[in-house]
Image (tube, helix red, strand yellow):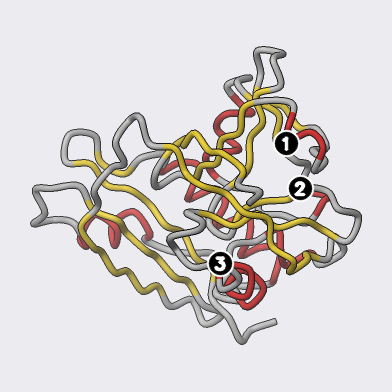
Amino acid sequence: MTDFSLIETLRWQPDEGFVRLRLHLARLSRSARRIGFPEPMDVVAKLEDAVRDDKEPRRVRLTFDGQGRIDITTAPFTPLPQDTVWKLRIASTRLDSSDKLLRIKTTCRTVYEAARAEFPQQQADEVILLNERQDVCEGTITSVFLDDGSGILRTSPISCGLLAGVLRTELICQRKARVGRITLDDLDKGTLYVGNSLRGLIRAALQKD
């Protein structure tokens, strides 16, 4: 398991620095240990150097490989309007809940790319993947959250075969979200959200036509 790299995608704000940095660093180190990569070194210094001359928000992509190499690229970042509602579609591509690599963010993205390719951008802002048991798992770039009226968002357990997203982790730690199985039928029984650390929580609507 050395033919891929780990990924962290962060948002940098000129007035607050790297958003959720502690959680990103913890996930990177935890993932590296799980797959036998060396411990990432000097990550913060390298991140800060990458945005040293920037004055506007940036999308920052960090990759870390099995030889301990860190590569960082940045791009302009524009937040979504607050009233944004993303269109969701369900992919026919399925995730295998027994695949432990799904729990780690890596450059092995074939299954996500296949799901995203099922729908043109005009039909879906994000595509949701199910596992072999028809459990709702995650989007191609987001975690899935369901407001079922309980006052706490529900998000699928890692055991379903999905990534431990940084935003997901934060919301669970803040007791704004809880872990619970989500079925296809459940998607009609509440308000949907998707989200990641880069963009935050986004209201969403499942498209069925």
User: Which is nearer the N-term, disc 1 or disc 2?
Assistant: 2
Q: Secondary structure at mark 3?
A: loop
**Alpha-carbon distance for marks 3 and 1?**
19 Å
* Residue named by callout 2: 136
User: Which is nearer the N-term, disc 3 or disc 2?
Assistant: 3
Q: Quadrant of residue 53?
A: bottom left
Say which of marks 3 and 2 sits in front.
3
**Alpha-carbon distance for marks 1 and 2?**
9 Å
Question: Is 18 drawn above or below residue 134 in the view shown?
Answer: above
Nearer the observer, 163 or 96:
96
* Residue named by callout 1: 187
* Residue named by callout 3: 119
Q: Amino acid at mark 2?
A: Val
Q: Amino acid at mark 3?
A: Phe
Q: Secondary structure at mark 1?
A: helix
Residue 17 screen position, x and y as percent: 25, 41
Residue 61 screen position, x and y as percent: 37, 63
Q: Please give the label number shown on residue 161.
A: none
Question: Is 82 drawn above or below residue 106 in the view shown?
Answer: above
Name the residue located 56 percent from the left edge and 35 percent from the top edge: 193
Q: Amino acid at mark 1?
A: Leu
- Are the residues tagged 1 and 2 within 8 Å (C-beta)? yes
Is 6 left or right of 183, judged from the image as shown?
Answer: left
